[in-house]
Image (cartoon, rainbow, N blue to C red):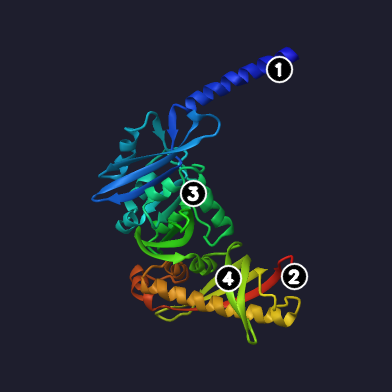
């Protein structure tokens, strides 16, 4: 028995050594960024280098080409190992690149059989290369994991490559992507959402606006927002965490539709001024009412901003199309900016922090 176990261990060591050697012969790309450089396209990749031992070290390489299809070929010419994109997890588009349109790159991603569907896309305020280099000393999956956890717990709606492609190829709605930026400490952070029309950047929403966008976009169980609050002559701020929210759309029968958005939000107060007593039902009712008014005000304001930019990130056109048999694409395009949108909110405070 002991002899068999010894042979097994020796065999596993040989097998693992062989696997390690194979991994060391390729460069696995986890993130790639695209930027405009004059009339050309600059691509930057980040990949783990397993040659340093068990703890992989991040390495970046960049290449410039006239087309995005050729960028990886240019980068591969600089690499001592073959570049593989089968484990690609994040694609970043610098702002200058996104303003010109990301359509060609999206089509290349879709048509590349080596690229999987566990993939996030994002727009960057600075050059994508700059943000990639800021994370060079971190895990090569740092940006991927940051986006993933902000979708799970932050103010970013549920999305992935599949849902983005559905939005991008749908003529009845526009698309959005997470928006990344460099903060004052030279750290990469979630800045909110970027709205795109036909693959071209239109506008940004900050993190606060993204909270209201997410509430209106789909049912959610994540997100936080700081609400102004007042009782009598006292004013302060209250931090609310979304525990569960539901959204329902309805429309009337007029030629230019009026969309009614009904939001139902259950939340937990994470922090509040000491003069608010959440054991008093009177205080809870006042807090809920003020939160409802603020959500209604900010949500309707946000919709007007989207209409002013003629970008339908919330998918109003797609919803109306599902309710009206004879609703044409021309009807949608000619009335979107004139639609009236009313938001009603029902908020319930389920619980407060342990201090309460």
Question: Helix, strand, or loop for circle 3?
Answer: helix
Q: Nearer the viewer, residue 166 or 345?
A: 345
* Sequence order check, earlier mark of 4 and 1: 1
* Sequence order check, earlier mark of 2 and 3: 3
Q: In this rendering, which labeled residue sits more in front, label 2 or label 1?
A: 2
Q: Is residue 256 above or below residue 165?
A: below
Position of residue 25 in the picture relative to residue 157 (left or right): left
* Sequence order check, earlier mark of 2 and 1: 1
Q: Mark 2 — residue?
A: 356
Position of residue 178 in the picture relative to residue 38 (left or right): right
Q: In 3D space, how far apart are the residues under numbered discs 2 and 1 (Cα atoms)?
A: 58 Å
Residue displayed at 57% across by 80% down: 293
Q: In 3D space, how far apart are the residues under numbered discs 4 and 3 (Cα atoms)?
A: 25 Å
Spot occupied by residue 176 in the image (x, y as percentages of width and height): 43, 60
Question: Helix, strand, or loop for circle 4?
Answer: strand
Q: Are marks 1 and 3 in contact (CB under 8 Å)?
A: no
Position of residue 221 in the picture relative to residue 160 (left or right): right
Question: Helix, strand, or loop for circle 1?
Answer: helix
Spot occupied by residue 35 in the image (x, y as percentages of width and height): 33, 50
* Sequence order check, earlier mark of 4 and 3: 3
Q: Mark 4 — residue?
A: 226
């Amino acid at each position: 028995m002991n002899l068999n176990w010894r042979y097994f261990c020796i065999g596993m060591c040989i097998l693992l050594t062989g696997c390690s050697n194979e991994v060391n012969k390729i460069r696995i790309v986890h993130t790639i960024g695209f930027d405009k450089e004059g009339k050309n396209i600059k691509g930057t990749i980040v990949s783990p280098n397993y040659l340093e031992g068990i703890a992989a070290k991040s390495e970046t390489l960049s290449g410039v080409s006239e087309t995005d299809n050729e960028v990886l070929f240019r980068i591969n010419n600089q690499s001592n190992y073959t570049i593989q994109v089968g484990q690609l997890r994040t694609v970043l588009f610098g702002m200058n690149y996104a303003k010109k349109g990301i359509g060609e790159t999206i089509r290349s991603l879709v048509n590349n059989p080596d690229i999987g569907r566990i993939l996030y896309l994002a727009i960057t305020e600075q050059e994508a290369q700059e943000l990639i280099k800021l994370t060079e000393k971190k895990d090569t999956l740092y940006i991927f994991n940051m986006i993933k956890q902000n979708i799970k717990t932050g103010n970013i709606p549920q999305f992935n490559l599949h849902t983005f492609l559905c939005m991008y190829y749908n003529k009845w709605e526009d698309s959005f992507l997470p928006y990344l930026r460099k903060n004052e400490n030279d750290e990469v952070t979630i800045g909110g959402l970027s709205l795109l029309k036909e693959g071209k950047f239109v506008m940004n929403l900050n993190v606060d606006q993204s909270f209201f966008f997410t509430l209106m976009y789909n049912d959610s169980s994540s997100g936080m927002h700081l609400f102004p609050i007042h009782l009598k002559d006292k004013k302060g701020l209250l931090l609310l965490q979304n525990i569960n929210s539901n959204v329902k759309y309805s429309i009337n029968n007029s030629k230019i539709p009026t969309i009614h958005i009904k939001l139902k939000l259950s939340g937990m107060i994470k922090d509040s001024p000491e003069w608010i007593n959440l054991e008093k039902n009177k205080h809870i009712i006042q807090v809920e009412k003020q939160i409802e008014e603020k959500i209604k005000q900010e949500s309707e304001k946000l919709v007007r901003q989207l209409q002013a930019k003629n970008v339908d990130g919330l998918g109003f056109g797609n919803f109306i199309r599902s309710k009206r048999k004879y609703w044409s694409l021309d009807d949608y395009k000619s009335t979107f900016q004139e639609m009236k949108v009313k938001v009603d909110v029902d908020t319930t405070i389920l619980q407060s922090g342990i201090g309460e």
